Structures are given as structure tokens and as C-alpha cells.
């Protein structure tokens, strides 16, 4: 794992230096919320990520210990991507983004899909319980 | 206020379309956490934002109703920037980013400053109470 040089030592900045762009947290949304695992699945998402950007972001996430890449024993062609604990812990940031959008939906984008709304409401009711349950869903041994 | 065309109607994407870059949430950090108000104050932050990027992001934030710009009666030269309720509501995203960085500090950036750590710990102890108190600190009439 490469130790990154950050713009400053502020913790907010450190997170933005790694995931502060329009695509990285969408890939993590796909991996954490919709449980996507393969390059093709991420590539098929509605936002239409370009394959070179997707390759670049997956490599960066792996380099910084946020995801892992492996092959299945019976399929040596596709890579399977999975979040590490560091990746799983990005979920509250993603859910707070969804909550913010729902909260300001009327002026922001009235057409916003209600996907994730039930999850966001459950999260807002009891954030600690929601995240504990979420962590249990990733039942494979987690590599930190 | 301009109604933006989003890449998709996913609420996570809608937030990323507005604040998904390396600078916008740093400006909001300065405004919300360190209570900075002027172009010069934002420009002086450690990360060294370029003035053209700062101008661009302030205009975008104003356009989307996340901040307001005004002049003080006794100083017509400087603009004073302040968050609207939509801007104030970005705080949980920012605090979750700080919490994530602190949580993975050992592998991420051991030199990370402990600035904001007390705030983040208070937030994590009782998120609802922390955000209510934070909202009360913005005592000026809030423009939504």
C-alpha cells in the first residue's frame, strides 16, 4: 500500500484527497449498497462511467486499501472486487449524501428516484444499529 | 436558482454532482467548522486553493442555494459568504469524512492533525444532539 502525500493534514482533506471526485463514491455505492462486484457491473451503472476512469479509480481504491481484487476459482477471467473494512466504513458518508439530497429534494431535483429512501430512513432512525447490521451483512472475512 | 441536470436521479449521485470534487467541501468546512466568511480567508487555507477555482466554486454554491453572498453596510469592498440551511446540512457529510479519516489514521496518514477530533468525538457520541446544537450556533436568519 502506497502512503499518499496529502494536501494538508486536516482529516476532512485527507478523505477528500482520496474520494473527492464525481466517481469514486459512486463505485463504492455500487459495491456497498447494490452489492456489485465486477468491472462490467460498475460500468453498467446509470451514470455511464468511462471505462478508463473506472479502471483508474478501482486501481486507486485498491492501492489505498479501500477495496480488494481477486479471481474466483472457477472463473479466471473476471476480477471480483470487494470492500475492505476501510471501504465499508465509507458507508456513512454515502448515506449522509443521500439524506442531504432527500432533505433538499424539492429545490434540488424533484425527479429524484426514491431508491435507497427506505435505507436512508432506517439509517436516520438509528445510525449505530443500522451500521452494525450493515457490517454483519459483509460475512466474508474482511481484509483491513 | 438554476435547476441542474444531473447524471442520474440517484440521490447519492445528485449530491456528488454538486459537491463531488476536491475543493467544494473544503470551502464548506471553512465556512461551517472554522466560521470563515471572506474570499481571502478561504484562499488562505492550508490546501492552497487557486483563486480561479475558489471563485468558480463560490459561484456554483451560490447558484445552487448552498451559500449566500452579501456586503456589510460599513464595508462595500468585501463579500461576506454564509451557508444557507442547505449548506448547514452538509455538515454530517463533512464530519463523517473526518471520522473516517480518524478511524483509519494509522494506515492512512499518521501525521494527521488532531484538529476537529474533539468535535468529531462529540458528534459520534450523539449525532442528533450535536447537529441540533450546531444549527443553533448559526443565529442569523437562515435563507433556504
Image (tube, coloured by chain):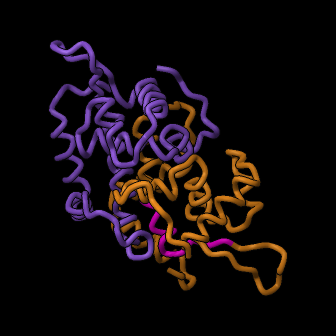
Chain colours: A orange, B purple
**Quadrant of residue B78 in the image?**
top left
Is residue A5 toward the left or the right of residue A54 in the image? Answer: left
At horizontal 59% and vertical 66% (from top left) the residue drawn is A61
Is residue A63 toward the left or the right of residue B143 in the image? Answer: right
Q: Position of residue B68 (x, y in %)?
A: 33, 24
Number of marks: 0
At horizontal 46% and vertical 20% (from top left) the residue drawn is B1
A137 in relation to B7, above or below: below
Is residue B113 toward the left or the right of residue A56 in the image? Answer: left
At horizontal 16% and vertical 40% (from top left) the residue drawn is B137
Q: Position of residue A16 (x, y in %)?
A: 46, 53
Can residue A106 be seen here? The reply is no
**Is residue A91 located in the magenta-colored stretch of the structure?**
yes
At horizontal 48% and vertical 29% (from top left) the residue drawn is B56
**Is residue A76 located in the magenta-colored stretch of the structure?**
no
Nearer to us in this view, B124 or A57: A57
Can residue A142 be seen here? The reply is yes
B78 in relation to A114, above or below: above
Nearer to us in this view, B11 or A87: A87
Nearer to us in this view, A88 or B114: B114
Is residue B31 toward the left or the right of residue A130 in the image? Answer: left
Quadrant occupied by the N terminus of chain A: bottom right
**Quadrant of residue A35 in the image?**
bottom right
Q: Position of residue B40 (x, y in %)?
A: 31, 32
Give the magenta range.
Answer: A81-92
Amino acid at each position: 500500500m502506497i502512503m499518499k502525500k496529502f494536501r494538508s493534514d486536516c482529516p476532512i482533506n485527507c478523505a477528500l484527497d482520496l474520494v473527492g471526485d464525481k466517481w469514486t463514491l459512486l463505485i463504492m455505492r455500487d459495491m456497498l449498497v447494490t452489492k456489485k462486484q465486477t468491472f462490467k457491473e460498475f460500468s453498467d451503472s446509470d451514470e455511464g462511467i468511462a471505462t478508463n476512469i473506472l479502471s483508474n479509480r478501482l486501481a486507486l481504491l485498491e492501492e489505498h486499501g479501500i477495496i480488494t481484487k481477486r479471481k474466483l476459482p472457477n472463473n479466471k477471467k473476471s476480477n471480483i472486487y470487494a470492500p475492505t473494512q476501510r471501504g465499508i466504513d465509507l458507508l456513512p458518508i454515502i448515506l449522509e449524501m443521500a439524506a442531504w439530497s432527500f432533505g433538499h429534494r424539492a429545490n434540488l431535483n424533484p425527479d429524484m428516484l426514491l431508491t435507497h429512501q427506505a435505507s436512508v430512513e432506517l439509517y436516520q432512525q438509528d445510525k449505530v444499529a443500522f451500521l452494525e447490521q450493515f457490517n454483519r451483512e459483509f460475512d466474508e472475512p474482511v481484509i483491513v
